[in-house]
Amino acid sequence: MIKIKRLIQIALCTMLIVSLFFFGKGGGFAEGNSIVIKKGDTLFSISKQYSISVKELKEYNQLSNNTIYVGQELMIPHLKQLDPMYVVIAG
C-alpha cells in the first residue's frame, strides 16, 4: 500500500514538472493582446491605431526592421490604465 502511494506521488510530481515546462514556455502575454497582420497593414498604421510609437512596437516584438508580413502575429503592449474616476471610502 505504501509503495502504491509513493508511486502515485512520483507520478503526480512528474506530471506537474512536465506541465510547467510545457505551459511555462509561452510568452506570458494575455489573450487578446496580439493582432494578426492583414494585407495593407503597416507598423505606422498599427502604431496610430493603438496609440504607441513605431519604435515601441518594434522593441516590444523584437523586430530589427520595419518589415512585417501578412499572417504575422504582433503583440500590442498594454496601455497604461487610467486612474480611477472615484474612490470609495468607508464611513
Image: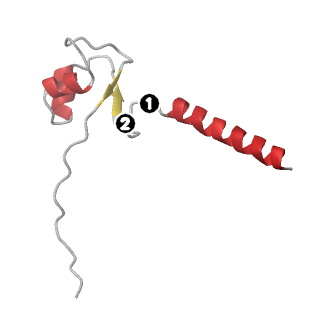
Of all residues, the one furthest to the front in this rendering is: 2
Residue under label 2, please give it. Answer: 29
| Residue 28 position within the rendered picture, expressed as x and y whole percent measured from the top left | 39, 36
Q: For the point 20% across and 11% down, which residue is it?
A: 65
- Does residue 41 appear left or right of residue 48 in this picture? right
Q: Is residue 88 above or below residue 44?
A: below
- Which residue has dot 1 on it? 26
Q: In which quarter of the image is the C terminus?
A: bottom left
Give the quarter of the image for residue 51. Answer: top left
Residue 74, quarter of picture = top left
- Mark 1–mark 2 Cα distance, whole angstroms, equals 8 Å
Pointer 1 with pointer 2, Cβ within 8 A: yes
Q: Which of 67 and 41 is in front in this view?
A: 67
Q: Which residue is drawn at 71% across and 44% down?
A: 9
Q: Residue furthest right?
A: 1
Amino acid tagged 1: Gly
